[in-house]
Image (spheres, coloured by chain):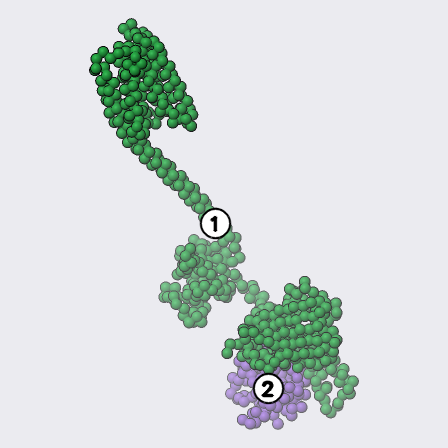
Amino acid sequence: MSVITAIKNFFIGGSPIAKQSATIGFFSAAVLLTLLLPELQFSSIVLAWSGTLALLLATALAVICSISPPIAHLAILVPCIDLLAIGALRAGVGVHGTLFSAILVLPVVWLASENGKRYIAIATIGSSVAIMLPYIVAVAVPSDPTEWLRGVFTPAVFGVAAAIINHLSNTSRGQLASIHRLAEEREVMLRGAVDYTERLRENEEALRAADRLTRSVLDAVTEQSVIGTDQTGLIDVWNPGAERMLGLAARDAQGKRYVHEFHIDFELQQRSKELNYPPGETVLNPGFSALVESARLGRPEVRHWTYVRADGSILSVEVAVTRRVDETGSTVGYIFVATDVTQALEVSRLKDEFVGLISHELRTPLSSILGYLELMSDDDENPLSDEQLQYLGVAERNAHRLLRLVGDLLFTAQVGSSSFTLDTAVIDVVPVVVASLESAGPNAANAGVSLVADVGADVVLVDGDSQRLGQACDNLISNAIKFTPRGGTVTVAVSTTATHVVVSIADTGMGIPAAELDQLFERFFRASTATRAAVPGVGLGLSITKAIVVAHDGELDVESEEGVGTTFIMRLPRKRS
Amino acid sequence: MFRVVVADDDADIRALVAIAMRRAGIELVADVATGDAALAAIRQHVPDIVILDVSMPGMTGLEVTAEIRADESLTGIRIFLLSAGVTEAAIQAGKDAGADEYLIKPFSPRELASRISDAIKQWSAE
């Protein structure tokens, strides 16, 4: 830092006491010189000491202003008092006082360095007053007119110097303000950069944590393979489950193999054919489009496929395919989560075999029982008595009951193994319901229950399996009759909405406790009211009925109040004409 | 008189079918318990009608049906399959093998006789 710069900063940025220190130093030197040098004499000790007192007063004010910011603005009085103090000292030293005129430069510079043109005037007038003070206080008399010029000429020089200093100070002040502003801006930017760096660090840490979480989740999935690919099928994710399932390490799969390479070509070709060769089918990755077509269209898909392991062996898998998207929602690849279903398929096959065996073993003796009962009752050559026919009727009824139970068990097993199919056609629901009502008529009459039909005559078309829907209606109506005490009523109604046909079966029976309604459609569940009243059954009818309705894309709801009755509501989608 | 061969591993069912055939006025030329015996009896008697159980020891009813359909000397034989299998797949398998009718156990002897009589009338009309 240059001396000029130091002086500039001293006067522009220094504290009042620092600015005052130079004046104190030279003022003290002047007083000491006057006291020590015999050539110098105080002409007016009162004025000299008044000046000294004034300087002390100014110094005290400088100290106070330096330590008390609220009154810092009063510091401008310090150089003003200094001018008077120096003037008084000069006056007190008499003819040799001019020796100390140079000290006036210090308060003049102080005043000139303040912000504002008025301080030039104050410095000029102040210096003039200080120079002319001996004449003002009448301790001296001008010897000639040039004495008066001293009170004008020197202050005029001080005034010009003050103007220059004021200008330089203003310039420096502006520069200083710019520097401060730049420094603040730099500070703000620096803080911003630090904040940004901190956020970046936090985001990076969050990303690392998310990556660790994803990695640990993927690693934890050891029973399923999770394979990720880009849009061409090139593998970029290969979890330990995939390593185990397909017998290939991640380093040998990621970035090197395509997912469709682990499929059987024939299956891919078949699927591709089913999809009518979806767009995107290329020579580069034949079959990949068939794998991802549903997912590509935004429909996650679960499908059975056969995986080919690295050693060439195969295994049956169920693969869920979903889309990978970027922040804009665009597809960037696919995720394939595969579950080995070899064991599940084997269980299903054994179950089918078991069901088939049970079905055969139970239905064959029933064939003999029912067949021979029929032969006996149909024997025209040896007609049976009414009593014998009654006995045969009981045996036949119970054989049919057993047959229904076998049928229900078989059907339930089919629903459970998803081998249950519908023979659908466009059918009118009304005749199906009427047929069920007619077949239930004798039962209702025997039970002393009134069967009321409110079915109308309009044709109501649905896509349905008339035999299965008839079975559902039979189940609901026979249930209603079974659970309604003698003298009660079962009302069967068919109505329509814009989209659905609604078949309701309402009884005035014993009702179902509210707490049991949720379990009503579960296999083998029996309501407590049914078991208390010893109503026969095994708890399969409603689960079968529900399965039939759901297979028709319909809904089966129940409303019930214990002791009042129950209403089953079957809603089936109407066929659009 | 039309002639029939009946094959079922259950003797009671064979007897039941035999009575139903008698009541329908059809001559029972053989009733056997296995698929192999059924095929031998069919080749020996060349009946008009064959009633086969699907599940039998040795050759199944489906296999016997396929053999009959593959043998030109047995052309024209009407085949009725009896089975406890009630699934769509089981019924379709019977039809695919070449059976004319598929009856699910338990069956009514009256209905069996009726369906065979109806079939005879239809063949006579043809």
- What is the three-letter code of the residue carrying label 2? Val
Disc 2 sits on a residue from what chain? B
Nearest to the observer: residue A1 or residue A100: A100
Residue A475 in the figure: left or right of residue A292: right
Q: Secondary structure at mark 1?
A: helix
State which chain is coloured green: A
State which chain is coloured purple: B
In this rendering, the answer to whether A360 lies above or below A175 is below
**Count of numbered tags:** 2
In this rendering, the answer to whether A163 lies above or below B25 is above
Task: Note whether residue A93 is visible.
Answer: yes
Which residue is rendered at x = 52% and y = 61% of the image?
Answer: A339
Which residue is rendered at x = 37% and y = 40% of the image?
Answer: A189
- State the residue position of label 1: A210
Spot occupied by residue B57 in the image (x, y as percentages of width and height): 61, 77
Disc 1 sits on a residue from what chain? A
- What is the three-letter code of the residue carrying label 1? Ala
- State the residue position of label 2: B50
